[in-house]
Image (spheres, grey):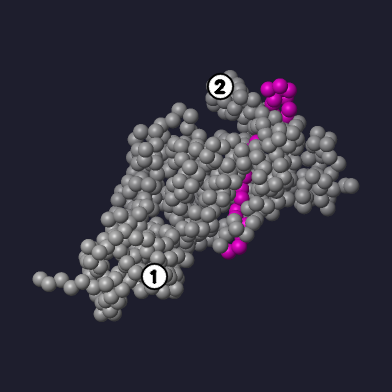
C-alpha cells in the first residue's frame, strides 16, 4: 500500500474536515501525523477551564473553557478528558469526553450520570492536545463546583441564637440543657465504622457498617440535634489494620501519630472513602429524628501538624493537594446530600511558628495553599475551624501572652489566639480568600479551653472563669465567627495530670480514665449566663479586676453589650 505523507498543518486541516462529516479524530488519530517525523515538543497552546457546573436539569454538566495558541504539532483538536480523583495524568489514555476546534469560547455538555457507574459528580476534567502518540495536558484540572444543586435536603442552614458551645458528656445532657448550650462537637472515628449489621448500597456495591457503633452515634447526635443544638462532626481517620484502603498509600504506622491522612489516591481508597462519606451524609441529613442532624463537618483535625493527619514528610504543596483531594470527596458527598451543610478544615494556633515544612506547617501556609489549589481546581465553599488556646495552655491568662514573643498584631504573628483573634478574621476577610460569592468564609472555634488549675499556682479557677468571659465577648462581638465550642464540660483525668483542667466541672481522680464530675467551678455559672442580656454583665463583673480593666468595651472591639455598661 502506498502511504502519502502530509504536513502537520495539513493534518490539522484534515482533522477539522473529518469532524465536519462526523468522523471523530480519535478514530483517525492512530497516525494523524507521521510518527517518523514526530519529535518531543511543548505545544504552544494555552487553555483554561473556567467552570464546571451541574445544569438546572440536574442531569447534565457543562464545562466552559478558553484555548489559544499555535496548534502546530497536534492533530488540530482540543480534547476534554475525564479523570477520577486518584488519577494524576493522562498516561496511556486515548479516550476523551469531548472535542472541539481551537477557540476562546469552548463549551462541553455531558451527562452527569449520577448514582451510576459512570457518575461524573466526583470527576475532574482537563483539556489536552494529541501529538500523534499521546495526550499532552494544556489546562488546569477542574471539578464540579456546585454539587449542592442535586441535594435532596435543601433546607437553609439554621444559625442558633448564640455562639455558645461546649464539648458535652452524654450522661450529663441535663446539665448541658441547664447551661443553654447551642453548639456541640462529636468525634466520628472514620476507621472504626465499617463492620457488620448495616448494609449500604452505593453505586452497585454493598458496604457494611458496624450496627452497634452507628447506634451509638445515632443516640448521641439525635440527643443533641433533637434539643436544637447545632452538631459539628469531626471526622478522624485512625489506624486500623482491617481497613488498609483508608490509609494513604505508602504511609507507615507512627508511634507519634494519633490520626492519618485520608486516602483517595487509589481506586480502592477513593471508592471506600466516598461510600463512607455518602453513608454519613445521608444518615445524618436530619430526615430521621432517631439518627439526628449534623450541620457542620470538619475533615480531620489540626492538619497543619501531621501528628493529627499523618502521612510522612512532604512539602506543603504535595501535602495540601493530597488532603484537598480527600476533602473534596467529603465535600461533594455532603453538599450533594444537604445543600446548606458546611465543611471545614481545622488548624491549631501556630499561625507562623513551630513548622519544619515536612510534617509541620504554618496555619497561614495551609490556608494560602488550600485556597490557591482550590481556585485552580474548582472553588468550594470551605470553612475554617480554628483552635486559639492560650500560650502556654497550662496557664489560663491569654491577655499577657504577648510576653511570650509569640503574639504580634499583624498577619505574620507566630501565634494567633484570643489575644490577637481579630488578626485571623481580618486575614480571612481579604478579597483573595472570600467565597466565589464574595462572602467571608465561615469560621468556627471548635477546640479551646482554659485550665482551672496551674502546676505552679494551684487553683486558678477564678482566672479560668475570667478568661472564658473575656474570650467569649471577643468572639460574640466578632461578626466573622459563627460558633465557640469550649473544651470541656468536665475535666478529663489524663489532662488533669498534665496540668490541664479545662472543665466547667472538676472530675474524680479515683476512677481511672473514666470522666466523673464532682464539683462545679466558677466558670459554670459564667458559661450559663454569658449570652443572656439581663445577666451577662453581672455574671462577668468579677473578671474586670482580674484582667485589669474598667469596662469590657475598652478591650473588646465593637463590644456587643456596650450600651448596657455603667461608665
Quadrant including the N terminus = bottom left
Front residue of 403/315: it is 315
Front residue of 156/75: it is 75
Q: Which residue is mark 2?
A: 511
Asked whether residue 515 is in view, the answer is yes
Element type where label 2 sits in the image? loop
Where is 6 relative to 462, above or below? below
* Callout 1–callout 2 Cβ contact below 8 Å: no
The residue drawn where x is 31% and y is 58% is: 40
Q: Which residue is mark 1?
A: 70
Element type where label 1 sits in the image? strand
* Left or right: 453, with 567 as reference point: left
Magenta stretch in the rendered image: 437-461
* Left or right: 121, with 482 as reference point: left
| Residue 450 numbered tag | none
Asked whether residue 290 is in view, the answer is no
Q: Where is residue 271? Give x, y as percent.
A: 35, 49
The residue drawn where x is 52% and y is 39% is: 357
Where is 20 relative to 451, above or below? below
Quarter of the view holding residue 473: top right
Packing grade of label 1 (10 A; few <14, some 14-19, many >=20) is few
Q: Where is residue 334? Give x, y as percent.
A: 46, 54
**Which numbered disc flags the more N-terminal residue, 1 or 2?**
1
Front residue of 518/40: it is 40
The residue drawn where x is 59% and y is 46% is: 364
Amino acid at each position: 500500500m502506498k502511504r502519502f505523507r502530509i504536513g502537520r498543518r495539513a493534518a490539522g486541516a484534515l482533522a477539522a474536515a473529518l469532524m465536519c462529516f462526523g468522523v471523530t479524530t480519535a478514530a483517525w488519530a492512530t497516525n494523524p501525523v507521521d510518527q517518523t517525523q514526530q519529535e518531543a515538543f511543548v505545544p504552544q497552546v494555552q487553555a483554561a477551564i473556567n467552570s464546571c457546573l451541574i445544569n438546572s436539569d440536574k442531569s447534565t454538566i457543562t464545562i466552559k473553557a478558553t484555548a489559544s495558541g499555535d496548534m502546530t504539532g497536534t492533530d488540530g483538536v482540543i480534547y476534554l478528558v475525564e479523570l477520577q480523583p486518584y488519577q494524576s495524568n493522562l498516561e496511556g489514555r486515548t479516550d476523551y469526553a469531548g472535542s472541539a476546534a481551537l477557540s476562546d469560547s469552548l463549551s462541553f455538555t455531558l451527562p452527569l450520570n449520577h448514582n451510576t457507574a459512570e457518575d461524573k459528580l466526583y470527576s475532574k476534567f482537563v483539556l489536552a492536545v494529541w501529538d500523534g502518540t499521546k495526550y499532552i495536558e494544556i489546562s488546569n484540572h477542574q471539578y464540579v463546583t456546585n454539587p449542592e444543586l442535586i441535594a435532596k435536603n435543601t433546607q437553609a442552614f439554621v444559625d442558633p441564637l448564640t455562639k455558645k458551645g461546649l464539648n458535652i458528656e452524654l450522661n450529663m445532657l441535663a446539665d448541658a440543657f441547664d447551661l443553654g448550650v447551642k453548639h456541640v462537637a462529636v468525634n466520628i472515628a472514620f476507621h472504626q465504622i465499617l463492620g457488620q449489621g448495616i448494609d449500604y448500597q452505593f453505586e452497585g456495591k454493598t458496604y457494611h457498617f458496624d450496627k452497634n457503633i452507628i447506634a451509638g452515634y445515632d443516640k448521641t447526635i439525635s440527643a443533641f440535634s433533637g434539643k436544637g443544638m447545632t452538631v459539628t462532626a469531626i471526622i478522624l481517620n485512625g489506624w486500623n489494620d482491617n481497613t488498609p484502603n483508608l490509609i494513604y498509600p505508602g504511609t507507615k504506622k507512627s508511634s507519634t501519630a494519633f490520626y492519618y491522612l485520608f486516602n483517595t489516591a487509589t481506586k480502592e481508597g477513593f471508592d471506600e472513602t466516598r461510600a463512607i462519606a455518602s453513608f454519613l451524609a445521608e444518615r445524618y441529613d436530619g430526615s430521621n429524628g432517631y439518627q439526628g442532624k449534623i450541620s457542620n463537618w470538619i475533615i480531620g483535625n489540626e492538619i497543619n501538624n501531621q501528628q493529627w493527619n499523618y502521612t510522612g514528610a512532604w512539602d506543603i504543596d504535595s501535602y495540601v493537594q493530597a488532603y484537598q483531594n480527600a476533602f473534596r470527596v467529603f465535600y461533594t458527598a455532603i453538599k450533594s446530600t444537604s445543600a446548606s451543610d458546611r465543611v471545614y478544615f481545622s488548624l491549631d494556633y501556630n499561625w507562623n511558628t513551630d513548622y519544619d515544612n515536612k510534617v509541620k506547617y504554618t496555619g497561614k501556609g495551609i490556608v494560602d495553599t488550600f485556597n490557591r489549589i482550590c481556585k485552580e481546581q474548582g472553588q468550594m465553599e470551605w470553612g475554617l475551624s480554628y483552635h486559639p488556646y492560650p500560650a502556654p495552655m497550662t496557664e489560663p491568662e491569654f491577655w499577657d501572652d504577648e510576653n511570650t514573643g509569640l503574639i504580634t498584631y499583624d498577619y505574620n504573628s507566630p501565634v494567633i489566639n484570643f489575644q490577637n483573634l481579630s488578626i485571623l478574621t481580618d486575614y480571612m476577610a481579604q478579597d483573595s480568600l472570600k467565597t466565589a460569592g464574595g462572602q467571608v468564609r465561615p469560621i468556627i472555634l471548635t477546640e479551646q479551653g482554659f485550665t482551672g488549675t496551674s502546676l505552679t499556682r494551684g487553683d486558678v479557677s477564678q482566672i479560668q472563669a475570667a478568661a472564658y468571659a473575656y474570650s467569649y465577648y471577643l468572639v460574640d462581638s466578632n461578626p466573622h465567627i459563627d460558633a465557640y465550642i469550649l473544651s470541656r464540660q468536665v475535666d478529663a483525668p489524663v489532662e488533669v495530670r498534665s496540668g490541664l483542667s479545662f472543665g466547667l466541672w472538676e472530675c474524680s481522680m479515683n476512677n481511672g480514665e473514666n470522666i466523673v464530675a464532682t464539683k462545679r467551678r466558677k466558670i459554670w455559672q459564667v458559661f450559663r449566663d454569658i449570652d443572656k442580656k439581663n445577666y451577662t454583665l453581672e455574671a462577668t463583673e468579677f473578671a474586670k479586676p482580674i484582667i485589669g480593666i474598667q469596662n469590657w468595651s475598652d478591650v473588646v472591639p465593637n463590644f456587643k453589650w456596650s450600651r448596657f455598661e455603667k461608665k
